[in-house]
Image: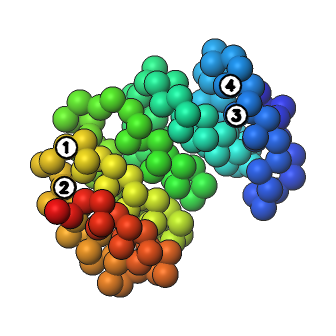
């Protein structure tokens, strides 16, 4: 799996699409893909995150065996490409209340990231967690309302979409 993700620079996804296709055909390869999230090469990590996010969109249960590791990575990741993909993947997990709170707290921290993509995807992740746990929704709605007024153009657009979904 790693061979598909090496080479080039961060401006290209390389052959990460091939990794998604391979995992769709052979789900057991997902473990290899997840292991690449901790690779020494930042390009491999970035492409692995992209491929894992896309593969888990179709098959979210692929993520479940790696729940604890992914929650830990969510809290410690500093690479923006990892952060933005983790923000979308984590809400796909079946989390207990404590884990949802951890994820919520980490994603709230992502709202301070210097990358507007990370902040925008953190909004989405927080909204997705809020849909799962009504106790998280009031604070999430307030954050999204604020970011819809003050954020980048992408954040404002995402915020308007999320508010339509979340508000009665």
Question: Cβ–Cβ below 8 Å for labels 3 and 1?
Answer: no
In space, the residues marked 4 and 3 are separated at their CA atoms by 5 Å
Is residue 93 at all visible to an observer of this figure?
yes
At 15% across and 48% down in the image, what residue appears?
134
Q: Earlier in the sequence, mark 1 or mark 4?
A: 4
Q: Identify the coloring.
A: rainbow
Question: Cβ–Cβ below 8 Å for labels 4 and 2?
Answer: no
Find disc 2 in the rendering and name its residue: 137
In space, the residues marked 4 and 2 are separated at their CA atoms by 34 Å
In space, the residues marked 3 and 2 are separated at their CA atoms by 32 Å
Question: Cβ–Cβ below 8 Å for labels 4 and 3?
Answer: yes
Mark number displayed over residue 1? none
Pick whichever, 123 or 167, lies toward us: 167
Question: Cβ–Cβ below 8 Å for labels 1 and 2?
Answer: yes
Find disc 1 in the rendering and name its residue: 133
Asked where in the image residue 25 lies, by quadrant, the reply is: top right
In space, the residues marked 1 and 4 are separated at their CA atoms by 30 Å
Question: Cβ–Cβ below 8 Å for labels 3 and 2?
Answer: no
Q: Where is residue 16 in the image (x, y as percent from the top left)?
A: 76, 41
Q: With 105 as the anchor, is 119 left or right in this view?
A: right
- Crowdedness near tag 4: few (<14), some (14–19) or many (≥20) residues, C-alpha within 10 Å: many
Pick whichever, 99 or 166, lies toward us: 166
Pick whichever, 41 or 100, lies toward us: 100
In the displayed image of the protein, which residue is found farthest to the bottom?
150
At 57% across and 41% down in the image, what residue appears?
53
Is residue 32 at all visible to an observer of this figure?
no
Find disc 3 in the rendering and name its residue: 20
């Amino acid at each position: 799996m790693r061979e598909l993700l090496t080479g080039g620079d961060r401006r290209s996804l390389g052959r990460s699409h091939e990794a998604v296709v391979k995992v769709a055909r052979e789900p057991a390869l997902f473990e290899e893909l997840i292991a690449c999230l901790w690779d020494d090469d930042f390009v491999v990590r970035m492409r692995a995150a992209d491929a894992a996010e896309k593969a888990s969109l179709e098959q979210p249960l692929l993520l479940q065996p790696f729940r604890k590791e992914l929650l830990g990575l969510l809290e410690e990741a500093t690479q923006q490409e990892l952060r933005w993909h983790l923000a979308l993947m984590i809400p796909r997990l079946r989390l207990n209340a404590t884990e949802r709170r951890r994820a919520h707290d980490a994603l709230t921290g992502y709202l301070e990231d210097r990358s507007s993509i990370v902040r925008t995807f953190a909004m989405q992740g927080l909204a997705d967690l809020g849909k799962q746990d009504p106790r998280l929704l009031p604070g999430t709605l307030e954050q999204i309302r604020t970011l819809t007024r003050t954020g980048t153009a992408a954040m404002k657009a995402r915020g308007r979409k999320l508010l339509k979904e979340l508000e009665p």
